[in-house]
Image (spheres, rainbow, N blue to C red):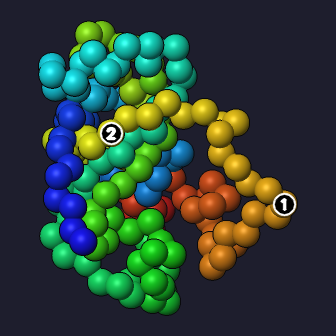
Amino acid sequence: MTDSSFIHIGVVHSPLKQHSEAPIQPKYSEHEGEIEIFPEYAPGLKDIDGFSHITVVFVFHHSTQYELLTYPYMGNEKRGVFATRSPYRPNPIGISVLRLLSVDGNRLKVKGLDMLDGTPVLDIKPYVPGFVKSEGDVRIGWLKNRPETTGGVKSKRDRKLER
């Protein structure tokens, strides 16, 4: 069954204009911008200002195709797309946890952007660390000891500058 009833509740206003400018994950971003929630959905922002972080569900609107086996960023071996965070997915949706700096009406000022300008927003949820369950040992598969999981890589642009 296919559900195509998703609607865009807003749009990202970001200094990032091209894919090559985007950090590999929000953790490595200091970029600030705004998420504009369309006026008809603005009442849903009530009480969001009490949270320091939000989880944003969005559309990779520049992704037009996908492969089930893909080379992950900085990888030299093909992996299953569901074992990567590639934007090229059967359903081109992404999630990012961002710092919420302020709320002004229907605009959320955020920090840690890894989304391009004009990115459609599908949903926003408050980030609550205590709601994330990880019992016992957490394994990160093929990403173990990778620079992107240890903080050794900040962005594609930084990596190019290091060459």
Percent coordinates x, y for residue 130 in the rendering: 70, 36
Q: Residue furthest top?
A: 104
**Left or right: 118, with 31 as reference point:** left
**Left or right: 28, with 144 as reference point:** left
Between 106 and 157, which is closer to the camera in this rendering?
106
Q: Residue furthest right?
A: 136
Q: Residue at x 54, y 22 (%)?
A: 52
Q: Secondary structure at mark 1?
A: loop
Between 112 and 141, which is closer to the camera in this rendering?
141
Q: Residue at x 19, y 76 (%)?
A: 65
Quadrant in the rendering for residue 45: top left
Q: Residue at x 28, y 26 (%)?
A: 34
Q: Residue at x 49, y 30 (%)?
A: 126
Q: Secondary structure at mark 2?
A: strand
| Mark 2: amino acid | Asp
Quick check: 148 above or below 132?
below
* Label 2 to label 1: alpha-carbon separation: 30 Å
Quick check: 103 above or below 52?
above
| Mark 1: amino acid | Gly
Would you name the residue on which mark 1 appears?
136
Location of the C terminus by quadrant is bottom left
Any part of residue 15 in sight = no
Q: Residues within 10 Å of mark 1 (few under 14, many from 20)?
A: few
Quick check: 33 above or below 88?
above
Of the image marks 2 and 1, the number of the one nearer the N terminus: 2
Location of the N terminus by quadrant is bottom left
Residue 155 — which label? none
Would you name the residue on which mark 2 appears?
123
Percent coordinates x, y for residue 4 in the rendering: 16, 59
